[in-house]
Amino acid sequence: DADVTQTPRNRITKTGKRIMLECSQTKGHDRMYWYRQDPGLGLRLIYYSFDVKDINKGEISDGYSVSRQAQAKFSLSLESAIPNQTALYFCATNQDGYGYTFGSGTRLTVV
Amino acid sequence: QQQVKQSPQSLIVQKGGISIINCAYENTAFDYFPWYQQFPGKGPALLIAIRPDVSEKKEGRFTISFNKSAKQFSLHIMDSQPGDSATYFCAASGSARQLTFGSGTQLTVLP
């Protein structure tokens, strides 16, 4: 099994719908992150969590929310999806802030 | 505001050649500079990283060169191989250990 598992791998949704992207990790790490990847923009930080009770906004948190259900689970929600949220979303984890382990990503299309 | 600027956006190199990707940063508080490699359909994976107390770090065919005064660092891939074809991201972080990524370079190594 992968160290970081993201579900779904691909999703097409309609404008205005609520959608949740899920992430689970088996590394036993405390820190988890959600990034968004867009062509030509690299990866941008949406939210991050250093433990179950610690949630922090990243660079581009507007329109997104997160939930840290357990040390191993960190989900990202789009409350009302819009087309410019079409992107590749990555979950990542690390223990000490250095070697990030990324999942394989969720490709989200909002039509 | 892009704190880490990466160039070129794309690079084509012949097998056996040297691939060079450059990054420049603005935030002098950054003290950790990793490079990530991403293959299609996969998440980024840590390739090599450097701290600013050294000017160069080499791991196999991959070398990071770091110029603290110029606030620049680069990745050199010696004897480039078709299997090196991927997207490469530079990144930087400070004491909070949140990575700021460059925009990415798509490397193609021709056989």
Image (cartoon, grey):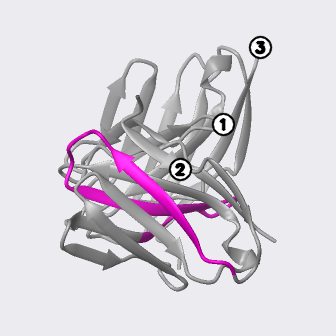
**Which residue corresponds to the image point at 68% horizontal and 78% vertical from the top-left?**
A17
The lab-note entry on whether marks 2 and 3 share a chain reads no
Mark 2 lies on residue: A7
Q: Amino acid at mark 3?
A: Pro
**Which residue corresponds to the image point at 71% horizontal and 80% vertical from the top-left?**
A82
**Which residue corresponds to the image point at 47% horizontal and 68% vertical from the top-left?**
A76
The reply to whether dot 1 and dot 3 touch (C-beta < 8 Å) is no
Query: What is the distance, in whole Å, between disc 1 and disc 3 at their CAs?
Result: 19 Å
The reply to whether dot 1 and dot 2 touch (C-beta < 8 Å) is no
Query: What is the distance, in whole Å, between disc 1 and disc 2 at their CAs?
Result: 17 Å
Chain ID, mark 2: A
Side of B95 where A36 appears, left or right: right
- Asked whether residue A110 is drawn in magenta, I would say no
Residue B30, by quadrant, is: bottom left
- SS assignment at label 1: loop
Mark 3 lies on residue: B111
Q: Give the quadrant of the C terminus of chain B.
A: top right
Density class for disc 2 (Cα within 10 Å; few <14, some 14-19, many ≥20) is some
**Which residue corresponds to the image point at 46% horizontal and 20% vertical from the top-left?**
B61
Q: Amino acid at mark 2?
A: Thr
Density class for disc 1 (Cα within 10 Å; few <14, some 14-19, many ≥20) is few
Chain ID, mark 3: B
User: Which is in the foreground here, disc 2 or disc 3?
Assistant: 2
Mark 1 lies on residue: B40
Closer to the camera in the image, A46 or B108: A46
Chain ID, mark 1: B
Q: Position of residue B73 (x, y in %)?
A: 43, 49
- SS assignment at label 3: loop
Q: Position of residue A19 (x, y in %)?
A: 59, 70
**In the image, which residues are magenta?**
A17-46
